[in-house]
Amino acid sequence: MTRRTVSGKPGSSTWSEPIDDDQSRAVAAYLLQHTDFLVHHPEVLAKLHVPHGAGGAVSLIEHQVAVLREQLGHERGRLNHLMARAHEYEQLSARLHELTVQLITAPDQERACAALEASLREQFSAEAVAIKLFPVDPEQRADDPLVQSFVEFIDRDRCLCGPLAPKQAEPLFGTDGEAIQSAALVPIRGTEQTGVLAIGSTDPKRFAPDMGTELLERLGAIAGAKLTDLAHRNG
């Protein structure tokens, strides 16, 4: 027999042992004396199993209760999923904030890129990271073979996630490119330089085309702002 919550004031204590027949009668007597108990505590009613009807028949009310219980189960599952996603998003936001602070204090481009790569590997569990920067002027980047691999991406405003073609993976990640199955390409836009931040994974499902990219795009905007700031300092 399972344990039950019961006391003179509902919800204030729990039985430490399974209830016996005397206790069952006491519960029944209490309910008979307080016939509106289930009206004031519908959460108890929702969990009760009350057989109804004869010959295997099920009443409309019991069927409705079964449907409502099923719907409640789905809603609880959905709520748990949303809460888990919210917790994950909160953790990612905190890591992005920490990375932003590191970028703000970086004195030059080399150390800014190093901080970005280290943070993505350590805090975001990235298996491969590449940062490629190009001149804003199209004429200055016309002969760059890497630019030609990403000619359709460089001027995008949004991230691109999904499988990465070998001809793109190798120029970005070098010899590690053969193992990369999916990647997130984050545009970096500065006043003097533009480029791509590539985050690669050996898991083909890690970066899917339909995944949310809001945080990645924030990261790209922060990196672009840092590049612009450094360009102004050195200008």
Image (cartoon, rainbow, N blue to C red):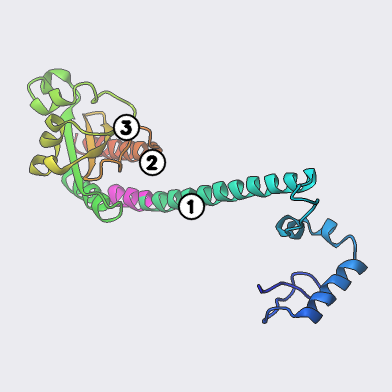
Residue 64: say if magenta.
no
Mark 3 surroundings within 10 Å by alpha-carbon count, few (fewer than 14), some (14 through 19), many (20 or more): many
Residues 147 and 113: in front is 147
Tell me the CA gap for discs 2 and 3: 10 Å
Q: Position of residue 233 (x, y in %)?
A: 23, 39
Q: Position of residue 167 (x, y in %)?
A: 12, 30
Quadrant into which the C terminus falls: top left
Q: Position of residue 107 (x, y in %)?
A: 22, 48
Residues 76 and 85: in front is 76
Element carrying mark 2:
helix
Q: Which mark is residue 84?
A: 1
Left or right position of 79 against 209: right
Label 2 sits on residue: 215
Residue 98: say if magenta.
yes
Counting residues from the start of the chain, the first of labels 2 and 1 encountered is 1
Magenta-drawn segment: 96-108
Residue 196 visible here: yes
**Looking at this rendering, what residue extends furthest in the front direction?**
55
Residue 19 sits in which quadrant?
Answer: bottom right
Residue 108 visible here: no
Mark 1 surroundings within 10 Å by alpha-carbon count, few (fewer than 14), some (14 through 19), many (20 or more): few
Q: Amino acid at mark 3?
A: Cys
Element carrying mark 3:
loop
Q: Residue at x 26, y 41 (%)?
A: 204
Counting residues from the start of the chain, the first of labels 2 and 3 encountered is 3
Residues 61 and 229: in front is 61
Q: Position of residue 194 (x, y in %)?
A: 22, 29
Dominant secondary structure, magenta: helix
